[in-house]
Image (cartoon, rainbow, N blue to C red):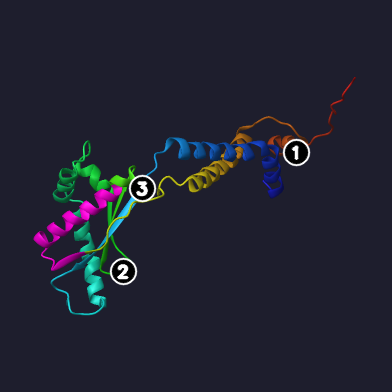
Amino acid sequence: MEIKQYFKILVKRLWMILTLPIVAGMVAFYVSVFIMQPVYEANTTLYVINRNSNAQQIGASYNDIMVGQMLVKDYRELVKSRTVTGIVIDELKLEGITEVKLASKISVNLKNDTRILEIKVQDPNREAARRIADKTAEVFIRKAIQLMKVENVDVVDKAQLPVTPVKPKPLTNIAIAMLLGLFTAVGTVFLMEYLDDSLKTVEDVEQKLGLTVLGTIPVMDIK
């Protein structure tokens, strides 16, 4: 099939190619704005000093940073452990939430290749996100000094009340939905053309049946 024929197929069902992405975008907009629950994110940052690092050293050496990057997995496991999340639930008196569910709301990372540990919490309630982030950091400090034998943990920034939600992202959802709608429409158009065995033109007869057309009968509009 030549490029010209592909173009004709697309033009023939152009209405479908235009309509489906628009409909998909409208559905994505409605779901993102009116159905999906907004999720807020609050974060607190900590500075962790390990006993193996030189507390008197100004700045973080390459080795310190590498050690911190390796220890972040340990920090992440401790922050999301039942030991920490259970205490957070008890002290904040959170109802209807388990340790596993709370752990799924928390993420832990090193900030910009430094020894600054960032704890992020996502929750539909922005005040709850802030309170959980601060309380998680507080409990982590106690347990890190006790269990991991770190030298000291200091709070760099406490969590602030988030203003705008991080989820959903309507524009991103709409763009993805319209793109998927476009791909679906194009695929459907070519599938319909492939499954259509009817003969409509002289070219169809020659290509599908391998016969030479000797003549055609025009359609006459008799009034």
- Residue drawn at (18%, 41%), measured in percent from left and top? 93
Image quadrant occupied by the C terminus: top right
From the image, state whether disc 2 or disc 3 is nearer to you: 3
Q: Position of residue 99 (x, y in %)?
A: 19, 44
Amino acid of disc 2:
Asp
* Cα–Cα span, label 1 and label 3: 60 Å
For label 3, the crowd category at 10 Å Cα-Cα, with few meaning under 14, some 14 to 19 and many 20 or more, is many
Q: Position of residue 181 (x, y in %)?
A: 55, 41
Magenta segment range? 129-154
Q: Would you say the residues marked 1 and 3 are in contact, meaning their CB atoms lie under 8 Å apart?
A: no
Q: Secondary structure at mark 2?
A: loop
Task: Please give left or right for residue 103 compared with residue 29 in the image.
Answer: left
Write down the residue under mark 1: 203
Write down the residue under mark 2: 113
| Image disc number at residue 40 | 3
Query: In the rendered structure, does residue 151 fall within the stretch colored magenta?
Result: yes
Amino acid of disc 3:
Tyr
Above or below for 34 versus 52: above
Q: Count every numbered label the image shows and give the total.
A: 3
Most extreme residue toward the right is 223
Residue 78 seen anywhere in this rendered image of the structure: no
Of the numbered discs 1 and 2, the one sitting upstream in the chain is: 2
* Cα–Cα span, label 2 and label 3: 25 Å
Q: Main secondary structure of the magenta part?
A: helix
Q: Secondary structure at mark 3?
A: strand
